[in-house]
Structure formats: C-alpha cells, structure tokens
Amino acid sequence: MTLILTQSEVRALLPMDVCMDLVAQGLAALARDEAVNPLRSAVWLPDRSGLLGLMPGFVSDPAALGVKVVGVFPANHGTPLDSHQGFVALFDSTTGAPTAIVEGSEITAIRTAAASGVATRLLARTDANELALIGSGVQARTHLAAMIQARSISRVRVFSPKEANRMAFAEREADRYGLPVEAVDSARAAVEGADIVCTVTSARRPVVMGEWLAPGTHINAAGSSISATRELDTEAVKRSRLFVDRRESTHNEAGDYLMPLAEGAIDADHILGEIGELLLGEVEGRRSDREVTLFKSLGLAVEDLVSTDHVVRQAREQGIGTDVDLTGRKDLLE
C-alpha cells in the first residue's frame, strides 16, 4: 500500500528541531558518499512564469529512495497558495514499489529552514542573538523557527516590500514566540547590526549589500536557487567565508556565487566547504568572532528524502494518513 500524507499531517509530524537533526544526518551521509544526489532538472513554461522541477535521490541508511516533483510559481506570492507546489514520492529500494506520496510544499518549507539552522549552529557566533529576516513569507516563518532552535534569539527585525505583509508577520510571530519582532521599512534597517541574516525572497537582484554587514555576521541565503537570480551583492559574497550544501549544485545553480565569479571578484576556491564536510570536521568553519560567514542554500533531494522518510515512519507508527493501492502487479493483468 502507498501512504498519502497531507500538508497539515506533514507539519504535525516534522518538528523543526527533529528536522534539523535529520538534515544534518543527510548532509553528513552525502559527504561520506553514502547518498546519491543528482543535479535537479526543470521544465520551464514557455513564458517563464513557472517551472516543474524533478529532484531524485537516494540515502543509504536508513534506505530512502525517491523523488520530489515540485512546481515553482512565483505569482502565487500574495495568494492563498504557496509558490512551491508538489509532492515527494518514496519507493521501496528493493522492489521499486511506491511506498508513500507526501505533500511537498511543507516538506520544502521545513527542510530548507532546517538546513539553514544546521549551518547557523556550525557557523554563527555562539553569542549571536539579533536576527534579520529579509522576506515575510513561508520561508521567513520556518527560518525564524530554525534560528530559534540554533541560537538564543532575543530580537528580530523583518523587512519585505509590502508593509501589510511585514506588519502581519511581525505581529503573528511575536505572539507565537513571545519575542520582540519589529517590522522595519528597509532591508538595510533590518540588516545593520544583526548577528544573523536570513534572505528568503523571490528577488532577482540583490536585496542585501555587503557594506551593511557588521563584523561577525552569519548569513543564510536561501531564496534564490537558479543561476540568473541572486539576493546578495558581490561585496557581501566577496567578504564572506562561503559554505554551501553541495559544490556541484552551486557551480550550476547559484546566482549568488556565479555572478561574482563571472565578474572576477572571487574564484572557485571561494567555496570553502560543504555543510556535510563541516559536520564531519573535514573543513574549518568560523575562525574568529569578526569573520562574516555565509551559507548559500540551494536545497537538495537528500534533505527531502530524510525528512519524508521520517514523516512516513511516524505516520505508520501513529496510524496517520490514507493508504491506497498503487503497486503494479503482473497477476492482475494475466
């Protein structure tokens, strides 16, 4: 039987602290060559209004074989629909039979922020407590949850272009966490003086400038995932110690890296390591309290797979979800 799980079921079964641990395990497995994570492929609509992406992968322990199929439609911003629509399908690694189909937008929302949370634990100053969020959508919500897990956050500033959106976010999240969350009227006002900066936008051009960053800042750049867009200007990338989720993905998909590289402002050695390598102690992270560190996040299939596998296991244990029979059988055709 194939288990079907909805968005609300995913949210209930995947707490942020648990997902951070799962993502850390998945990234470490990738660094140990115990996982397979091909580059994603995408089909764009002719007018470039949206795309359908395919993200297959495999993690060996526990075995998780599957693919995320995700539609990315930026015009959904400001509507009841998330910009990311899709599902993660898991398959039995022995027979290939489909074992689960799980709503994908919530998996994406939680695991993306969880990866930033893992990076923040590894790279931010231990005393970092002031957070800047650039963006006020789904990823801002989940990134705030992850940053609270990663560090003792005492103050949050949020900026997004629409005043109503940032004001609503600030009020809602302040009530949720009992923290001061201030909606400010510019990205600069949010970033200046912050210890941790998370960019979670759909911007095509830079929204954070290097000159705004205080010494010792850690940045999670999670909004852009294609080569033609970026959230950070060249100076922000140039002055940062850069870490990524996957080198191969960064060289093919990360505009935040590829544009400064094309300008000659940095070279390929500017990527100091992957998060999995940091977890294994194979590369050096932050070296002083004054260094600026940067995690460029693109999102990987292994993150989806370890998160979805956990959700499915928990759902089976708790009797949650709907079973349908999608297994192909020869005997039914004879």
Image: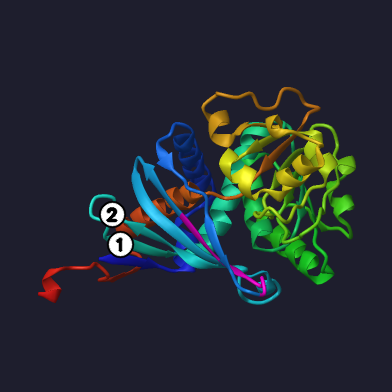
Q: Residue at x 78, y 53 (%)?
A: 180
Quadrant into which the N terminus falls: bottom left
Q: Answer with left or right where residue 159 lies relative to residue 178.
A: right
CB atoms of marks 1 and 2 within 8 Å: yes
Q: Residue at x 49, y 33 (%)?
A: 31
Give the residue type that dot 2 points to. Asp
Q: Position of residue 84 (x, y in %)?
A: 58, 66
Disc 1 is placed on an element classified as strand
Q: Residue at x 71, y 64 (%)?
A: 172
Q: Which mark is residue 78?
A: none
**Residue 26 sits inside the magenta stretch:** no
Image height of 325 relative to 28, above or below: below
Q: Which residue is mark 1?
A: 98
**Residue 50 sits inside the magenta stretch:** yes
Report the span colored magenta.
Answer: 47-55
Q: Residue at x 64, y 23 (%)?
A: 284
Q: Position of residue 62 (x, y in %)?
A: 34, 43
Q: Which mark is residue 92?
A: 2
